Image (cartoon, grey):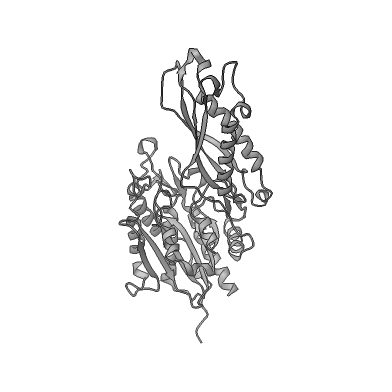
Amino acid sequence: MASPAPPLKDAVGVLDRDPFVALLSKLIGESQRLQNDPPALVPQEDLVAQHVVDALRPVSTDTGGGPLVVRKVSYTDGRSNVIVEYPGTVPGRVVSFVGMHMDVVPANPSEWDFDPFSLTFEGNDKEKLRGRGTTDCLGHVALVTQLMRRLGEVKPPLKHSVIAVFIANEENSSVTGIGVDGLVKDGLLDKLKTGPLFWIDTADKQPCIGTGGMIPWHLKATGKLFHSGLAHKAINSMELNMDALKEIQTRFYNDFPAHEKEKLYKFATPSTMKPTKWSYPGGGLNQIPGECTISGDIRLTPFYSTSFVVQKLKEYVDDINAGLETKLPTRGPVSKYVLPDENLRGRLEIAFDGDVMNGVACNLESRGFQALCKATEEIVGYVEPYSITGSLPLIRELQDEGFDVQTAGYGLLKTYHAKNEYCLFSDMAQGFQVFVSIISQLEADA
């Protein structure tokens, strides 16, 4: 009689530092060509995809050396996605790790204390792994690659198929259809709907159960340019815009107050609307500007509809335009937004960028969430799910398509998109064990 297979945790073991760091070093070494800010910076994710494929090839069906099914999928030159499957024995039983993206946000080397485009350590401290992408998200690419490689080496008998999806084009939404959105559209991820999908692109080792939607907006005010010594003959576009924005914000907070579910999901903040940029065509200090634009964003908890908010903001602006004489205060005895003698009125226009994102509230009743929490408590020592109104692209669309999306990550939130980005090896090692625990729990259910 054959002896029973050892428990998965014993068979797979822990994250092996040397191959993990070796792979991460290759990935960070490509990061200068992975920066995503088109049209100036177009990432070449295929560079990372090839490193992933090369690392898994010895245990793939391509060489006959192992069971992993590895597939590259590209929708445009140089920008690949990679789907890796460790086949299980029971059809329809699946656990997936998705969202490990192979692009990064830009980094300016002159602003960093070390080279962002190579993996370095802090003196003799080998715990801190430094470089652009270590936290977001090349560290996770290397981590999940090592998980899949280890499964391919050990070949544990699993009922569940374990699937990893490494994606292109997460950091910029001006180009669409070439990352996970393309894979979903083509039905290449349909089988993932039958089990929990873990989106691995957050931080701090805890379940992230909610994210915010994001609406970029631009409020333009048009007045009448004139000499500042004759203010009674001008319509000051800056004053108009400031007063209008205050009124719009007041209405926004009245219509979209803190939602009762935000406490359950532990959101750090409610929905917010705030200015972040100011622009105008220029002029002298003695000129009252005739036009200016205030831009900003709305971060919206997932319990409100982004499309409804956009509709309401348009209504606010239309209402203010129709009643400039009564809807807004003015500043000083000659400040005004209507010049009846000249038949002139100030005017407000609001526009929205195309990359509106919806927030997500994960299903707190799902088996995937329960497994993630139990694994986190077991490995990290405590579990404290959290939500933020930071935005993750794509995952709400996955949820709307029928995927059970849960999110986690093992980088550091304080270095996300920041200068001097780094992660900790010990955190990544715990992430590896969390993944193995999740698979083990689901296997026990089966």
The residue lying toward the viewer, choosing from 196 and 243, is: 243
In the displayed structure, would residue 65 be above or below residue 415? Answer: below
Coordinates of residue 65 in the picture (x, y in percent): 35, 73
Coordinates of residue 375 in the picture (x, y in percent): 58, 61
In the displayed structure, would residue 71 be above or below residue 244? Answer: below
- The residue drawn where x is 55% and y is 22% is 340
The residue lying toward the viewer, choosing from 26 and 323, is: 323
The residue lying toward the viewer, choosing from 102 and 333, is: 333
Coordinates of residue 42 in the picture (x, y in percent): 34, 48
The quadrant where residue 272 appears: top right
The residue lying toward the viewer, choosing from 396 and 205, is: 396
- Determine if residue 149 is in view: no
Q: Tag count in the figure?
A: 0
Identify the image quadrant of the C terminus: bottom right
- The residue drawn where x is 50% and y is 53% is 410
Coordinates of residue 438 in the picture (x, y in percent): 55, 65
Judge left or right: residue 361 versus residue 151. right
- The residue drawn where x is 60% and y is 56% is 381
- Determine if residue 105 is in view: yes
